[in-house]
Image (spheres, rainbow, N blue to C red):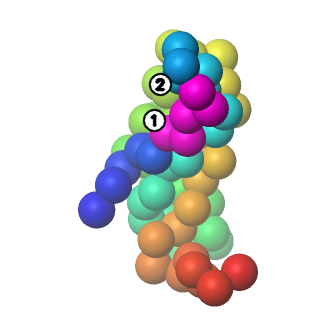
Amino acid sequence: MVDVGVYKKKRPFNFLKIIQVGKTNQDGTPVKREQEAIEDIEEHTDIKVTFIDYENYNLDK
């Protein structure tokens, strides 16, 4: 399982997108540990994190 995937453009590997993959609450929001990880990543990278629920993600879309 990958917690964070980073897509890279080309050298010097500029960040294009950061994806957090994890569990959600019943209402679809990230569980507390996932939300804290997202906040930490965004604070240290200034890049908006895309969150994906790994239990309900459709790889065919």
How far across and how far down the image is residue 15, in percent? 60, 26
Q: Which residue is mark 1?
A: 36
Mark 1 is on which residue type?
Answer: Glu
6 left or right of 1 in image: right
Q: Residue furthest front?
A: 11
The local secondary structure at tag 1 comes to helix
Residue closer to the observer: 8 or 23: 8
Which of pointers 1 and 2 indicates the residue nearer the eye? 2
Mark 2 is on which residue type?
Answer: Asp
Mark 2 Cα within 10 Å, few/some/many (few <14, many 20+)? Answer: few
Q: Which dot marks residue 55? A: none
Mark 1 Cα within 10 Å, few/some/many (few <14, many 20+)? Answer: few
- Residue located at (59% from left, 53% from top): 51
Please report the bounds of the magenta region as a residue range.
6-10
Q: Give the quadrant of the C terminus.
A: bottom right
Q: Which residue is mark 2?
A: 40
Q: Does the segment drawn in magenta span residue 8? A: yes
How far across and how far down the image is residue 16, in percent? 66, 33
Instruction: Please identify the dominant SS of the magenta region.
Output: strand
- Residue located at (60% from left, 21% from top): 14
